[in-house]
Amino acid sequence: QGAILIAALLALERVPYHPKRGYIMNGVSFPNPYSEHIDALTDTSQSVLFILGRKDKITPNSSGEQLREGLAKAGFQVSSCYHDGGHGFPADDDEMALKTIVNW
């Protein structure tokens, strides 16, 4: 629920400050009630890393990808990390995904 909350706050431009490094969205859903707000965002250069599990049965990747595209259109610097797991963080043996996150 944290990722969709941050997505909604970004859409409403109600984040009091942005973290220096940016945001990490793990298994995020597109905040449907705020779609027009996402479309209206402009002039930002914040970074966002999307972590998406290929076997996520809770939140389809298409929902997170929709948010990623909307934020990219608004000027956010977006990156993606796909892993072979589900809704959670990548497994310890998924070295490629873990390196992507650490290097971000």
Image (cartoon, helix red, strand yellow):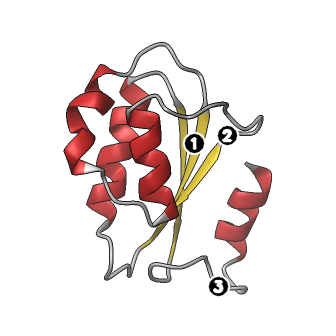
Mark 1 sits on what residue?
48
The residue under the point 39% across, 32% down is 12
Q: Which residue is located at x 51 percent, y 28 percent?
A: 76
In this rendered view, identify the residue nearer to me: 71 or 54.
Answer: 71
Residue 36 found in image quarter: top left
Is residue 18 depicted above or below 5 in this figure? above
Viewer-side label of 3, 2? 2
Of residues 29 and 11, the one nearer the viewer is 11
Sequence-first tag of 1 and 2: 2
Mark 3 or mark 2: which comes first in sequence? 2
Q: Residues within 10 Å of mark 2 (few under 14, many from 20)?
A: some
Q: Is residue 82 left or right of residue 58?
A: right
Q: What element carries label 1?
A: strand
- Residues tagged 1 and 2 counted as in contact (Cβ below 8 A): yes
Q: Mark 3 points at which residue?
A: 91
Q: Position of residue 99 (x, y in %)?
A: 75, 63
Q: Where is residue 53 in the image (x, y as percent from the top left)?
A: 46, 73
Closer to the camera: disc 3 or disc 1?
1
Q: Where is residue 24 in the image (x, y as percent from the top left)?
A: 61, 53
In the foreground, 48 or 11: 11
Residue at the disc numbered 2? 22
Kind of element beneath mark 3: loop
Amino acid at dot 1 = Val
Marked residue nearer the N-terminal end (3 or 1): 1
Q: How far apart are marks 1 and 2 (CA)?
A: 6 Å
Is 17 left or right of 60, judged from the image as shown?
A: right
Q: The disc labelled 2 sits on which kind of residue?
A: Gly
Number of other residues with Cα within 10 Å of mark 1, as a class: few under 14, some 14 to 19, many 20 or more: many
Residue 30, percent from left and from top: 30, 52
**Residue 9, quarter of picture:** top left
